[in-house]
Amino acid sequence: MENVKLHQGFLKGWVSPWKSGHSGRTRIPPWQENCSGSLTVVEGFFLVKRAPEKMLVIDDDPAFGQIMKALAGARGIQCDWVPSLESLGRVGRVGDYDLAILDYFLERFTGGEIAEYVDVFFSKIPVVIVSSRPDIHAQQRNWPKCVRLFVDKATGARSILDLALGLFN
């Protein structure tokens, strides 16, 4: 497999054949013409990894949650913010999202404990743990596999979102 960065307009139009019967060329499907993300080439087939469409933020800081919603919305990503897992209604709703950003310190469950649930039931959803105390990363040695990043909140909401979206490129 070969990963290639796909920029808007790159590969628009005629590309390598991926089905026979044409003059050795075929058009990339219209839904993939103007997308950003990464392109995986597998034996002539092009699989585009898109940015997440839905993102979940669980954080008891309403200001952080609203900032993340605004930043994600500006990038065309639907973002739902809840202050706790209980506010989500049921754990199964986590499966409706493409990405989860969890604060480590919450009232009832820690972000690490929620990540364990995500890892068991929705292991393909990447999780980013955030905290205003960066020493937590050193204390927690066995993060669940779904936890792809630990980011200090001092990094800033925009940088946290950039790092989280970088998981899809």
Image (cartoon, helix red, strand yellow):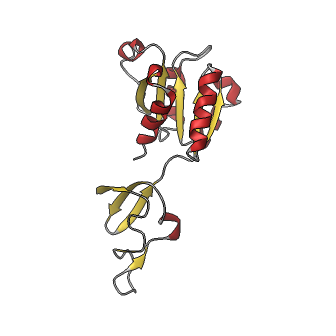
Residue at left offset 59%, top offset 24%: 64
Q: Is residue 38 above or below residue 151?
A: below
Residue at left offset 44%, top offset 71%: 28
Residue 51 lies, in percent from the top left, at: 49, 48
Q: Quadrant of the N terminus?
A: bottom left
Q: Nearer the viewer, residue 34 or 41?
A: 34
Q: Nearer the viewer, residue 49 or 143?
A: 49
Q: Is residue 144 above or below residue 19?
A: above
Q: Nearer the viewer, residue 28 or 91?
A: 28
- Image label count: 0
Residue 20 lies, in percent from the top left, at: 38, 82
Residue 146 lies, in percent from the top left, at: 44, 33
Residue at left offset 60%, top offset 30%: 67
Residue 168: image quadrant is top left
Residue 107 lies, in percent from the top left, at: 62, 13
Residue at left offset 47%, top offset 31%: 160
Q: Is residue 141 above or below residue 158?
A: above
Left or right of 115? Residue 6 is: left
Q: Is residue 17 above or below residue 112?
A: below
